[in-house]
Amino acid sequence: MTHRPGRHFLQIPGPTNVPDRILRAMDRPIIDHRGPEFARLGKEVLNGCREVFQTSEPVVVFPASGTGAWEACIVNTLSPGDRVLAFETGHFSTLWQAMARRWGLNVEFVPGDWRHGVNPEQLEARLAEDNTHAIRAVMVVHNETSTGVTSRIPEIRRAMNSARHPALLLVDAVSSLGSLEYKHTEWGVDVTVTGSQKGLMLPPGLAFNAVSRKAIAASKANRTPRSYWDWDEMLKANDRFFFPYTPATNLLYGLREAIAMLLEEGLQTVFARHRRFGDATRAAVRHWGLELLPLDSREYSNSLTAVVMPQGHDADHFRAIALERYDISLGSGLGKVTGVVFRIGHLGDFNDLMLAGSLAGVEMGLRAAGVPHRAGGVQAAMDSLSNETAPATAAHAVGSISAVTAIPLAKEAP
Ligand SMILES: *Cc1c(COP(=O)(O)O)cnc(C)c1O
């Protein structure tokens, strides 16, 4: 490959752009993972994770991709033969339930059209029928990265409560944590699964399970053999801020920085920023005259947008042209929607001008690929961004307080 000047636009919905600040934070010598310096790092990241998941419960961190976090969730809480309820919201829910089947679980997979999230009324009705409480867990993908549909977890929890059903609530928040509102404890989630390479702005390689007390109790009673993924071993070592085996030390340096960045900006500001990106991107798509894959506006994802190609046009052909001409990577259609949709990732370390640039790449790509559209979507997105003014960062919002604490005091120097 010859050199391509300028920056590549990585606008797939994960892995996302890793900010320089995180790259620099990871550029450090390896330390003894059983030494005192590691314990300080372990303490910071394990406590910091709880803030990002909005929980006071433990967060377990594995060296793995998000798929590993799925598996850890299953093998700790469930046993072969257990009945679980899952919903076909798209490609990722399909993969997760397939994994559950391979573990011998008895999966009830509610069919879906890949344009809607989990329907809380349907869930409540199904749980109400289950008067023997045979269903041990409900598995939900919060943000379906294949469709750009976000399921409403608080309503799902309410449905489970109204049905007075004791099933565990297992939630995949891989492409939502750190970009969309998410409250592990307040929403009554038992296990939240995520990975490092999406909203957390890190390279791939870390997998997370936030675990409720009820989930820990289920894991203690659960006889499924497990070793690498065992929460018990992990939590014992984590008590002293260590890990039972060699952790991904440098990714943990990155994680410490990512948590600091999210908390400096303020989680509410982060979520508001993504809402603006979602609104602006949808404004562009509507202006182009293209169709959004999600059909219910309550379920629009603010971390990515899935766009349906006009009949007779192939999404992968369009993506290939956009990549070749404008050096932008857009997300492909996955599974059932291969070739039918393309996805614009707008999550992570991202700002208004990066969005405008990305949407310009899409618009020029549509033109280059001969896809019928109305020019001016980028303008519509800019109008949307201008109308919804950028929220002040947390630092600005608290004004004088942070200004004072931000002044480096000589006596605090190491
Ligand atoms: C990316 C993603 C995964 C899979 O994570 P890997 O790190 O690729 O194993 C699972 N669920 C969702 C919703 C995702 O977006």
Image: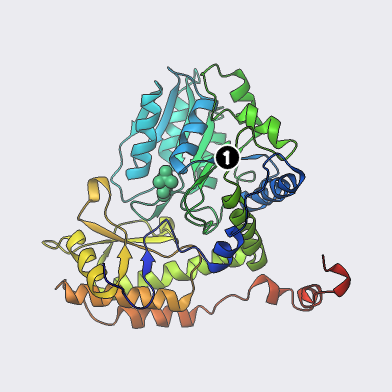
Residue occupying the point 55% across, 46% down: 154
Residue occupying the point 51% across, 19% down: 224
**Residue 47 percent location from the top left of the image:** 71, 48
Residue occupying the point 20% across, 61% down: 315
The N terminus lies in which quarter of the figure? bottom left
Image position of 142 (left or right of 188): left
Pick whichever, 170 or 233, lies toward us: 233
Pick whichever, 323 or 245, lies toward us: 245
Q: Secondary structure at mark 1?
A: loop
Pick whichever, 148 or 263, lies toward us: 263
Q: Residue furthest left?
A: 312
Residue 232 vertical placement versus 209 (above, below): above
**Residue 385 percent location from the top left of the image:** 46, 78
Pick whichever, 350 or 145, lies toward us: 350
The C terminus lies in which quarter of the figure? bottom right
Q: Residues within 10 Å of mark 1 (few under 14, many from 20)?
A: many
Residue 142 vertical placement versus 95 (above, below): below
The quadrant in which residue 105 appears is top left
Which residue carries the number 1 mark?
Answer: 189
The quadrant in which residue 263 appears is bottom right
Please say whether residue 291 is visible from this viewpoint: yes
